[in-house]
Image (cartoon, grey):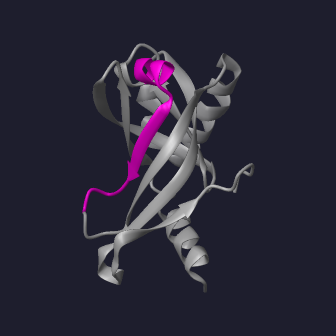
Amino acid sequence: MDETSEVEAVVRSLLTQPTLFLSTSAEGEPWGAGAFFVESGLFTLSLGLELHGRTLTNIRNNPRVALVVSNGNPFEPFLQGAADAEVLDDDALEVTAASLLAKAPQIEPFLGAPMAAVRLHVRSWRATDVANGWLPGREIQAPASSEA
């Protein structure tokens, strides 16, 4: 297996986790939040965010975000990424909510809150796996115009 395929396999494996950490900023103020997500490709993730929350407000002002997919243990493999966030129309919320519920049934109580669907177009991933010597992590870039 070549290095790119190996990194892609680690990314795909980690994207089976239900949650990520999202970093946003607006007006010079950074903000971090956790969110449930569903993947529709190696570089495309969707999530539901509280309609009146700081995370969504920041994305509307500055759609460039950073994200981490991790179980919280720095000695287990984890992902870091850079993405462009896109707030979707109301029609996408129903599909996103159904996909989130299928992946992470524990999200059900959250789905009763006013929400917006957001799609993350990941520009690059860095996979770190300390136990396997991936320090610094190994990077892969999103294809120019493809949803891998």
Q: In terms of image quadrants, where is residue 109?
A: top left
Residue displayed at 54% across by 33% down: 85
Q: Is 25 rendered above or below residue 74?
A: above
Asked if the stretch drawn in magenta spans residue 147, the answer is no
Q: Nearer the viewer, residue 109 or 55?
A: 55
Relative side of 75 to 128, left or right: left
User: Residue 132 location in percent, x, y?
Assistant: 35, 82
Residue at far bottom of view? 1
Q: Is 60 rendered above or below residue 133?
A: above
Q: In terms of image quadrants, where is residue 148?
A: bottom right
User: Residue 14 location in percent, x, y?
Assistant: 47, 62
Q: Which residues are magenta?
A: 56-73
User: Residue 83 location in percent, x, y?
Assistant: 52, 42
Q: In terms of image quadrants, where is residue 93?
A: top right
Asked if the stretch drawn in magenta spans residue 71, the answer is yes
Q: Is 50 rendered above or below residue 142?
A: above
Residue displayed at 35% across by 56% down: 70
Residue displayed at 45% across by 55% down: 17
Quarter of the image that includes the N terminus: bottom right
Relative side of 19 to 30, left or right: right
User: Residue 97 location in percent, x, y?
Assistant: 58, 32
Residue displayed at 61% across by 40% down: 99
Q: Is 119 rendered above or below residue 58?
A: below
Q: How many marks?
A: 0
Q: Nearer the viewer, residue 21 or 18?
A: 21
Residue at far right of view? 145
